[in-house]
Image (cartoon, helix red, strand yellow):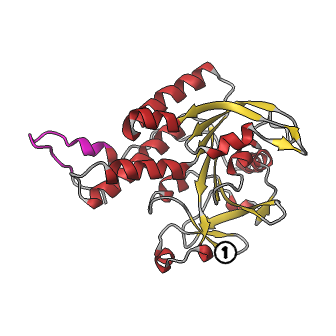
Amino acid sequence: MPLPAKTGSLGGPNPLDKYFDQPEGSAATGIQIMVHARPKVGKTSLAATASQLFTPDTPCFLEDMLFLVMDADGLAALESRTVKGKPAQVRAHTLNMLQIWGELGFVKGQRVLREKAGEIITKHPDIEWIVTDSLTAMDIEANAAHYDNDSEADSYTKFRMVLGEHRMFHSWIRRLGKNIIHNVHSKMLSDLVDDKAEKKRDILRMAGGGDIVPGLTGQALPIYQKDISAQFYLSLDRSGARSLHTLSAKGAEAGSRYGHLLNAEESPDLLAIQHKILAARAKEPTQ
């Protein structure tokens, strides 16, 4: 239920209202994929496989991808990639959110994000994918901005403000009409020692068994979930082989629109998964 309208000290609109009940805007036409994994498992490298220009063992420039860089390590690993000892760097269009947040702060930085990303997409119309790398890093910055720096609001209002940041970001990015990949730092529930984790509302389940706790503020996941085409958990075994596990929500809510059409374990190739989703979409009745 939405919070009642608040007023400022002079009886006018409260500036906090912008964080609550953001309009969704028009629906995105692209597909949206969410990838969960621990840090340094290879979410950024997996995102690169969605590009039609990606080559697995030679250097490449992904003209069709824009990375919103929110973690320091992910893109650096791609740009220094080697395969069998030979250079195989992967480069793409980037927007360094770490630098923007550091210079302007989070709230103003998010406004600049929307402006600069729009400029990049206009200048490079071949961009088909936008990668949030990672959504967890944005969540951490939003919490720091509102919990640590805003002493006037009560804790519930601060919590709503963080969710409001997610609503504004989700509403903006879906209106771009591009394909989207959201990377999230998440863990297996069995790996958490805090018993309270079992009471988290936002728990995802592997198709083959096993629960995942998303690395996001509670109740943030559903903001994105209704538009997600597919969700996955990326794991890494001791030999260095990666496995991509299809996820659903734990409980009655669907975890993703097309998750039931995917295998419990898919090949770590997002371009192939995109083709599966588009094939399923083509069979849907037109409205």
Q: Which residues are magenta?
A: 5-18
Of residues 86 and 143, the one drawn nearer to the viewer in this rendering: 86
40 displayed left or right of 175:
right
Quarter-wise, where is residue 178 in the image? Answer: top right
The spot of residue 127 in percent (x, y) is 67, 29
Quarter-wise, where is residue 38 in the image? Answer: bottom right
Question: Furthest-front residue in view?
Answer: 85
The spot of residue 232 in percent (x, y) is 68, 59
**Residue under label 1:** 210
Of residues 20 and 83, the one drawn nearer to the viewer in this rendering: 83
The spot of residue 260 in percent (x, y) is 70, 63
Circle 1: residue type:
Gly
Q: Residue at x 45, y 39 (%)?
A: 25
**Residue 15 located within the stretch drawn in magenta:** yes
The number of numbered discs placed on residues in the rendered structure image is 1
The spot of residue 111 in percent (x, y) is 41, 33
Would you say the magenta stretch is mainly helix, strand or loop? Answer: loop
Q: Residue at x 15, y 45 (%)?
A: 7
Quarter-wise, where is residue 11 in the image? Answer: top left
- Vertical position of residue 108 compared to residue 161: above or below: above
Q: Is residue 210 visible?
A: yes
Q: Is residue 287 visible?
A: no
Question: Furthest-top residue in view?
Answer: 123
**Residue 99 located within the stretch drawn in magenta:** no
247 displayed left or right of 270:
left
